Image (tube, helix red, strand yellow):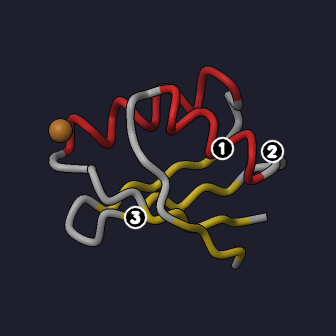
Amino acid sequence: MALKLKVPNIMCAGCGETITDSIHTMEPDAKVDVNVQDKTVTVDSAASEETIKQAIVAAGFTVEGYQQG
Ligand SMILES: [Cu+2]
């Protein structure tokens, strides 16, 4: 299941790495793709959207919404 999350406070590639690391802490097998320009995070994993959202929030970012794809 792929999820695309809008994370408006992504500012640079470093933010993307922080988010990716946080998601991998909870879901080591997740495929994470951060688009700094669009401020979106695409995650392909078996985890629920709530788990992914929590990982992003735990890293200090805000999730504005998500769509299942
Ligand atoms: Cu940054």
Residue 43 x %, y %: 60, 55
Please name the amino acid that badge 2 sits on.
Ala
Decide: marks 2, 1 in contact (CB < 8 A)? yes
- Image point (36%, 29%), residue name: 18
Which sits earlier in the primary sequence, circle 1 or circle 3?
Answer: 3
Please name the amino acid that badge 3 sits on.
Thr
Which sits earlier in the primary sequence, circle 2 or circle 3?
Answer: 3
Residue 51 x %, y %: 73, 39
Decide: marks 2, 3 in contact (CB < 8 A)? no
Residue 27 x %, y %: 71, 31
Q: Nearer the viewer, residue 47 or 29?
A: 47
The C terminus is located in which quarter? Answer: bottom right
**Residue position for label 3:** 40
Residue 6 in the figure: left or right of residue 51? left
Q: Which of 37 and 8 is in front in this view?
A: 8
In the rendering, which numbered label is found on residue 27? none
Please name the amino acid that badge 1 sits on.
Ile
**Residue position for label 2:** 47
**Residue lying farthest top?**
25
The quarter of the picture where residue 59 lies is top left
Q: Is mark 2 on a helix, strand or loop?
A: loop
Q: Marks 2 and 3, how far apart in space?
A: 18 Å
- Figure check: 23 above or below 68: above
- Image point (79%, 64%), residue name: 1
Residue 65 x %, y %: 55, 67
**Residue position for label 1:** 52
- Figure check: 8 above or below 47: below
Mark 2: C-beta under 8 Å from nearest atom of ligand 1: no
Q: Marks 2 and 1, how far apart in space?
A: 7 Å
